[in-house]
Image (cartoon, grey):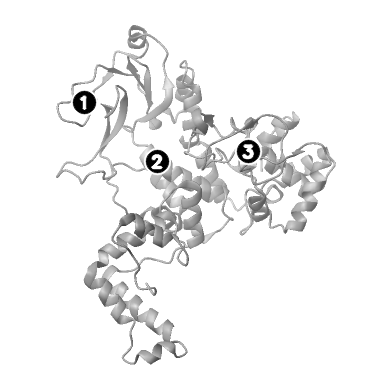
């Protein structure tokens, strides 16, 4: 604004300008600025700029002159566009960089679901429909009756975006952080959506490997209608969707869809997991179930088990009893034991992250690293994009950006399935924890040491 509401007629040039020095806006910030500038319109932009000029231009070069000009311009901006609560820019930028989430989710994490609005229209129901491309079947969110929505209007809550934002809030931010004070409210909104009996979720990689006749026998006779694709003259799909209650299976092909509300009962969940070829994909849905990892993260955040300002990712704070056992077994101090648990458990224990979580200086980190290396439990190496030099021994999995590469042994705990060309299938679209971190630390230690029993902190 102070720079004169910079912009270019060409959209690509406009975005490039906003991302260069001195502005260095992130892609989503540049897009948000562009939308706001468009809302101001030509008259609004001229009014904002005119407000910056005092009656005597010489006042601009006097002490406080620039600040006064900014306040005058901001007042005109507020009159024309309104205001929003102040946002933690660092949290918003991290959400964008690490999870690809826009500003609206930073606002909702801070103030609850109602703290911000976007163009999303909530679904009144869901239907199975032929895919717009190819011969598959997809879940389609149905908007309320009324005029046709503008092209590309999102319908239905983005479940995976909400879930990934919540995992980030409860595992990668300091306890008591105001930037995520609304996370519980956001979780309750997500839970309400998942508990809707009619909600269907695609098991993207889950297909029942069987003949159409056998699928009809196993999952019939109930059926779910399959609508045609949303394009002119689309023929009805040659697919039958058999309704088994908690599970819908299509023939031919075996494409499968689950009703999250129906598998909240542990017994039903076990029954569905026993269906051939679906267990892996169901495991990727498990953190979102009632009582699943995401709910346990929420309860943990409310428990005050970790002091305000500390991190769940620091084992010294989140699982001190486990840490003591690990230190004794390693024959090392608490800092080296904490670093070992982080390397054995977390997907991205980069040097930068470890220092942030543990509050370490570079010197403290180097001391812990040296002591841990001396135990023989880790190896030292240089690996592209790892952001660290200590690793668990064993196989290594390369992943395509924005994911970091990691030890292969960690994939199962994060319910991640590598695909072709470094892509992944995961519960949250990123490699994120699937359970509270104190549980994951205990499970990783059991895996690495063979020690039975898990920390109950």
Nearer to me, 306 or 200: 200
The quadrant of the picture occupied by the N terminus is bottom left
The relative height of residue 427 versus residue 3 in the rendered view (above or below) is above
- The reply to whether discs 2 and 1 touch (Cβ–Cβ < 8 Å) is no
Dot 2 or dot 3: first in sequence order is: 2
Placement of 231 over or under 158, stated as above or below: above
Q: Residue at x 22, y 72 (%)?
A: 43
Mark 1 secondary-structure assignment: loop
Real-space Cα separation, disc 2 to disc 1, in angstroms: 24 Å
Q: Residue at x 33, y 65 (%)?
A: 7
Residue 340 place in picture, x, y as percent: 73, 42
Quick check: 301 above or below 115?
above
Q: CA distance from mark 3 to mark 1?
A: 44 Å
Circle 2 SS class: helix
User: Which is closer to the viewer, label 2 or label 1?
Assistant: 1
| Residue 159, disc | 2
Crowd class of label 3 (few under 14; some 14 to 19; many from 20; radius 10 Å): many
Residue to which mark 3 is pinned: 440
The residue depicted at 27 percent of the width and 62 percent of the height is 38
Image coords of residue 158 (percent x, y) = 37, 42
Residue 165 image point, x, y percent: 47, 48
Q: Residues within 10 Å of mark 2 (few under 14, many from 20)?
A: some
User: Which residue is labeled 1 in the image?
Assistant: 228
Q: Which of marks 1 and 2 precedes in the sequence?
A: 2
Q: Give how far apart the Cα atoms at labels 2 and 3 are.
A: 23 Å
């Amino acid at each position: 604004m102070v720079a004169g509401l910079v912009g270019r007629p060409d959209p690509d040039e406009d975005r490039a300008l906003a991302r260069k020095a001195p502005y260095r806006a992130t892609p989503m910030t540049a897009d948000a600025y562009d939308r706001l500038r468009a809302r101001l319109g030509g008259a609004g932009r001229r009014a904002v700029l005119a407000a910056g000029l005092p009656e005597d231009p010489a006042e601009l070069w006097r002490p406080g002159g620039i600040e006064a000009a900014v306040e005058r311009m901001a007042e005109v901006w507020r009159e024309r566009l309104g205001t929003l609560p102040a946002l933690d820019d660092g949290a918003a930028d991290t959400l964008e960089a690490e999870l690809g989430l826009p500003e609206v989710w930073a606002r909702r994490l801070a103030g609850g679901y109602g703290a911000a609005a976007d163009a999303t229209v909530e679904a009144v129901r869901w239907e199975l429909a032929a895919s717009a491309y190819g011969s598959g079947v997809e879940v389609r969110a149905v908007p309320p009756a009324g005029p046709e929505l503008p092209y590309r209007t999102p319908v239905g809550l983005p479940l995976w975006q909400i879930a990934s934002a919540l995992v980030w809030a409860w595992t990668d931010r300091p306890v008591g952080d105001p930037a995520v004070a609304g996370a519980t409210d956001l979780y309750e909104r997500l839970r309400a959506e998942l508990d809707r009996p009619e909600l269907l979720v695609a098991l993207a990689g889950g297909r029942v490997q069987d003949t159409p006749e056998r699928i009809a026998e196993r999952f019939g006779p109930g059926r779910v209608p399959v609508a045609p694709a949303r394009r002119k003259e689309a023929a009805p799909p040659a697919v039958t969707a058999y309704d088994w209650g908690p599970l819908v299976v299509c023939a031919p092909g075996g494409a499968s869809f689950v009703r999250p509300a129906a598998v909240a009962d542990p017994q039903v969940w076990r029954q569905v997991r026993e269906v051939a070829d679906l267990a892996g994909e169901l495991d990727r849905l498990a953190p979102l179930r009632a009582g699943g990892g995401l709910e346990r993260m929420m309860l943990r955040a409310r428990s005050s088990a970790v002091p305000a300002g500390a991190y769940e990712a620091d084992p010294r704070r989140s699982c001190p009893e486990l840490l003591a056992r690990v230190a004794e077994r390693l024959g090392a101090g608490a800092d080296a034991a904490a670093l070992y648990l982080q390397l054995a458990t977390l997907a991205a224990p980069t040097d930068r992250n470890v220092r942030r979580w543990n509050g370490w200086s570079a010197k403290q980190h180097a001391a812990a690293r040296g002591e841990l290396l001396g135990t023989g439990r880790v190896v030292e190496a240089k690996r592209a994009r790892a952001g660290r030099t200590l690793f668990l021994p064993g196989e290594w999995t390369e992943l395509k950006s924005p994911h970091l590469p990691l030890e292969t042994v960690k994939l199962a705990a994060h319910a991640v399935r590598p695909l072709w060309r470094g892509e992944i299938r995961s519960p949250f679209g990123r490699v994120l924890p699937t359970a509270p971190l104190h549980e994951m630390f205990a499970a990783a230690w059991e895996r690495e040491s063979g020690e039975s029993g898990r920390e109950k902190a």
